[in-house]
Image (cartoon, rainbow, N blue to C red):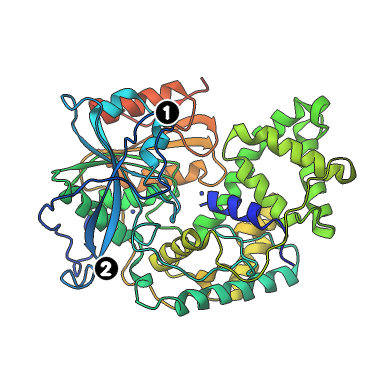
Amino acid sequence: MKPRTTTLTVALTSMVVAGCSQAPAHINTEPMGSTDVQWSACPEGVENPEDGPPQLQCATVPVPLDYDDPEGTHIDITISRLPSNNPDTRRGVLLLNPGGPGGTGLDQPNFLVSQGISPSVLDSYDLIGMDTRGVGHSSPISCGFTDDLAYYGAVPPYVVDEAAFAEQTATAKEVAGRCAANDHDGRLRHVNTANMARDLDRIRAALGEEKASFLGYSYGSALGAAYASMFPQSADRVVLDSNIGDTHLDHDGMRRYSRGMEETFPGFAEWAAARHDRYGLGETPQQVRDTYFTIAERLDRTPVDGVDGRLFRLATFVTLYNQASYETAAESWQSFLNPTEAAAPADEPPTGNGPSAADNSWSVFLAVTCNDVEWPDDVDAYRRAVDEDRETYPLFGAATANIMPCAFWQHTPAEPTVSIGPEGPTNVLIAQNRRDPVTPLRGGELLDEKFGERSRLLTVDGSGHGVYALGNNPYAQDIITDYLVEGVMPEQDTTCGEA
């Protein structure tokens, strides 16, 4: 049964969306000559500061839909620009990606300003945000998600029992079929990481830049790794933050989400235990962990205000993205422990089968994830993975090992995944929190191993999803800023202790 808290599900799953040195020989990767980029006002809905005039400018850059047919159909990629605060010290452009795949990035420059990104970075670069191909204002795609479909987005639902696995298998097959049926113009097949990396280089060329720097978070680490690998001579200073471990997300990468939750949850449990007098969730971290299982299993049997055990587990997973969410999470746990005393009002149930608010972001996530690499099509392989991870990662393993629409995807990958190799300049700084629920430390280590001498790993003894500007470790902020502004790369892998 679909939970009644549809809006909560959309909000949470939209948040989770937690790169051979050359491209394959048959692809023409040479950028077009520079185009005359025409900057103007950004589309409605792109946020600008409320207390001043709009600062972001927007433009479109044409790119081939299919790089095997560079003279064929073109699509427009919409980009934004926050110009350098000090043109006299400007050194170039900093291309940004917020993650996903499927997240809009047009307002990413202003978001980073709001998070306190260093003023010296704002002096040194024009910040370039964008909607990558298929997203938002860049030739958007749709799988036809509707509110009546019990779909959880980027992270599959927790498998409570065999009936729940069968339900998710049917849903995954239905979603894959919808994606194929709604691909009327054949764009879906061309939404992949390799093409997005090629788009980055077209944007660089269109802006008249010999090189471009890059800052990407979460899935943006995969895109940045692909860009640095395919275009080592065009990629300038590259920062990959909160890393998925490669240029693509596969089933093993999804399963690492549960490892991340196991590594990050103790921080919340310690925080809650220290506030037992206020929240009553347990006097020790182990008692708080036991409370998690008590609530989840109770909601498995009897949902409260539309929240079942699957949604509770997902909400807790998303809570760990940022310690600022701990208080809200603790209060919601109280309501589930004492539903008659503090039950939240139920959301109105969805009516009809109107388009889902997350249709575009979910569609792009699936297109990139399923197009990048061939997923197992053996249903029993996912069932076995669920059973294994339920034991190995009991907090959330039976969710992220669950079957996804990629198992039934009707396109095979158009090209091999982008391989990472050590050939090229030492220009990749990998930033990674030790405790990250969606991209655990292992992802940063894997990426560093693949890049070899091209990269340095900056490990931060912190918790949450996002290091630069999004985190609060001053040592890490200084190291990344010094690299972006001055080009000072750490001589070796570095660890920043707690501030």
User: Counting other residues with Cα less than 10 Å from the Cα at mark 1, is it few (<14), some (14-19), or many (20 or more)?
Assistant: few
Q: CA distance from mark 2 to mark 1?
A: 39 Å
Helix or strand or loop: what does disc 2 sit on? loop
Q: Quadrant of residue 364?
A: bottom left
Residue 83, above or below 107: above
Side (left or right) of 492 relative to 325:
left
Residue 139, above or below 347: below
Residue 412, above or below 252: below
Which residue is located at x 45 percent, y 77 percent?
A: 180
Which percent across, then down, holds residue 29? 18, 61
Residue 349 in sight here:
yes
Q: Which mark is residue 51?
A: 1
Closer to us: mark 2 or mark 1? Answer: 1
Kindly indicate whether the residue at mark 1 contacts the one at mark 2 (C-beta within 8 angstroms): no
Q: Earlier in the sequence, mark 2 or mark 1?
A: 1
Q: Which residue is mark 2?
A: 65
Side (left or right) of 355 relative to 369:
right
Which residue is located at x 76 percent, y 26 percent?
A: 275
Side (left or right) of 199 relative to 370:
left
Q: Which mark is residue 96?
A: none
Q: Amino acid at mark 1?
A: Asp
Q: Amino acid at mark 2?
A: Leu
Helix or strand or loop: what does disc 1 sit on? loop
Which percent across, then down, holds residue 104? 41, 51
